[in-house]
Amino acid sequence: MLEITEGSHAVAKAVKMSRPQVIAAYPITPQTHIVEALADMVADCELDAEYITVESEFSALSACLGASAAGSRTYSATTSQGLALMFEVCFNVSGMRLPVVMTIANRALGAPLSIWNDQQDSIALRDSGWLQFYAEDNQEATDLHYIAYKVAENPEVLLPAFVCFDGFILSHTYEPVDMLSQEDVDRYLPAYKPVQRLDADDPISMGMYATPEYYLEFRYEHDQAMKRARNAINKAGKEFGEMFGRDYSALVEGYRLEDADTAIIAMGSLCGTIKDAIDEMRSAGKKVGLLKIRCFRPFPAEEIRNALSHVKRVAVLDKNVSVGAKGAVAIEVRDALYGKALPVLGYVLGLGGRDVRISDIRNIVSLAESGKGDQFYGLRTEVL
Amino acid sequence: MRELRIHGRGGQGSVTAAELIAVAAFEGGVYAQAFPAFGVERRGAPVQAFVRFNDQAIRLRSQVYEPDYIIVQDSTLIRDVNVFLGVKPGGIVIVNSGKKVDASVPAGVRLITIDATSIALEVLGLPITNTTLMGAFAAATGEIKFSALENALRNRFRGDLADKNIMAAKKAYDMVQGGA
Amino acid sequence: MALGIGCSSRPGKAPNNKTGSWRVFKPKFNHEKCTKCGMCKTICPEGCIEESEDEFFIPNESYCKGCGLCAEECPSDAITMEQEEK
């Protein structure tokens, strides 16, 4: 049913209906409203879960690691510095192949201190072995939580997942969201059945010491699981579409791309603004389209190659920067298109909450048309 | 698509006003989007909040630069911030002030001044003017029905507090309808 | 050995690892000097010294690494370390 609600509260409701058994989180702007809402639900007995209050994000994810190892469906949420503090545990959770789902309300990383949105936090964890989904709007942000659990817990995958949605821009926005009913969610997402778990009557050890004879093989297996996740996402997204009418089977999504000369690539809430900009540019006769990356890990290289086979140039918009190189998405898109004579131009923009407007998208398309790229966009040169 | 920009100070309830206007608009059958632009998070600092109204789902995520409507919760902001910036011709600006506003609004823009602080003090006993100005907004723009606003307020506040806020909003609604 | 998911494994037991072959010196117990105090059993880091029926103490040579702590601590100097012929 369509209802108007704050993004954070919509996500909290989706998490509640996913029936997590253990939640451990530490509040941090702009994630706070999600975990406050969940704490209320547990306190009001609307959600039968263990809510573990902790003294830091490191402890939050450590508690989730233990709970997931014991066989519970587990949830956390964080952002920015909080995610940075979880860095070590993130690798342990994924290495132990524990299907924890965590919402990232994307925010810039300090220093300088910023509470505003960009995607540097989750991008900095791109090598941590977690699935990474990016939501365009609060509809996707809620739906992707059900899909994340379904894919993460698939015995072929067994990997943790980030569901990323832009801090403030989505987390604090009231907009209509079609919320599933509990019955619908239960039909789509049955209870978690762990393949293995900590059990005093049948003990195992997890995350053991791997000598040089074994470590390489463990990383290979981890990578293989991530590759199998593509299939699992296709399947889980298709099933969701068949049941509820919103198809998430593809890791990327094109908008007016079929006959486009210029393809824009972006992730997250930026895609909505880009779509409005494309409609405007199309009315003025410019053939521009969007390729939205909804799933960044596993990286959809093949889908990107196929989707861009006919375009003349690609403009990649990154709300992150790998300092000393480029935006992460631009680097990986260029890698996906290796061997093709197709200009791929990167633009780093919107960092630390800098607003991105339709006119900015128009300007970037003009820059791409004149072959100028691989740059920061929107710099206030007067303060440099 | 129509857009509203609310100027206020931290603690005056600008963000809540934006949310409740969006909720009321949604009840009226349009797509609505409300979001804040947090600055420094402290009481008294200038803040902005935005609402969009549209017949289709709203995809645009940038802030509002060319609003159809502006609400100014605190007339002292006019000195510090260019609150009328970008307002569209034919737009409506609602300013909370007991005096004549000594700022020039662009030509073709309707300026409504309403002493929301006095109404709020009289009805609520507090100088929190957001709900009063929502009543003025409903009357001036027709974007939201008063009944929808009433429902939104009743869902957000409890009992007596809801009644008082509805009363304050109604008072402003009637004043603006009567040609304030 | 196939890899366990997430580097997991079933628990094993220390006795699965016979450590006696690591030894260079082995303890020789002189029962004439021994007062049966049991210090050697208490101190043995490998837990491989057992008490026999006649209350003397005997190391299990399958596990004794030859560390020499029992000889060092024996209050009666009843244990000497001797090089083992291999």
Image (cartoon, coloured by chain):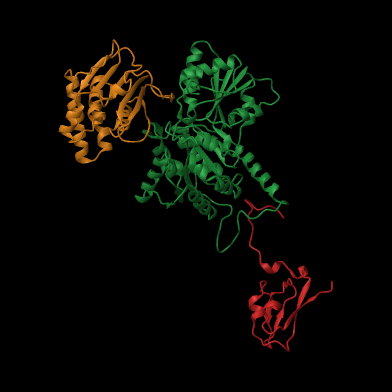
Please say if A225 is above or below A175: below
Residue A17: percent from left, percent from top? 43, 44
Residue A360: percent from left, percent from top? 49, 19
Q: Quadrant of residue B174?
A: top left
Does residue B17 appear left or right of residue C40 in this picture? Answer: left
Judging depth in this view, the residue of A7 and C69 nearest the camera is C69
- At a point 66% along the width and 67% down the height, the residue shown is C13
Residue A359 in view in this figure: yes
Residue A334: percent from left, percent from top? 64, 26
Does residue B40 appear left or right of residue A265 in this picture? Answer: left
Judging depth in this view, the residue of A279 and C34 nearest the camera is C34
- At a point 49% along the width and 41% down the height, the residue shown is A81
Residue A191 in view in this figure: no
Does residue A330 appear left or right of residue B97 in this picture? Answer: right
Q: Quadrant of the N terminus of chain A?
A: top left
Residue A103: percent from left, percent from top? 48, 40
Which chain is in orange here?
B
Q: Quadrant of residue B149?
A: top left
**What count of labels does the image hold?**
0
Which chain is in green here?
A
Display colour for chain C:
red
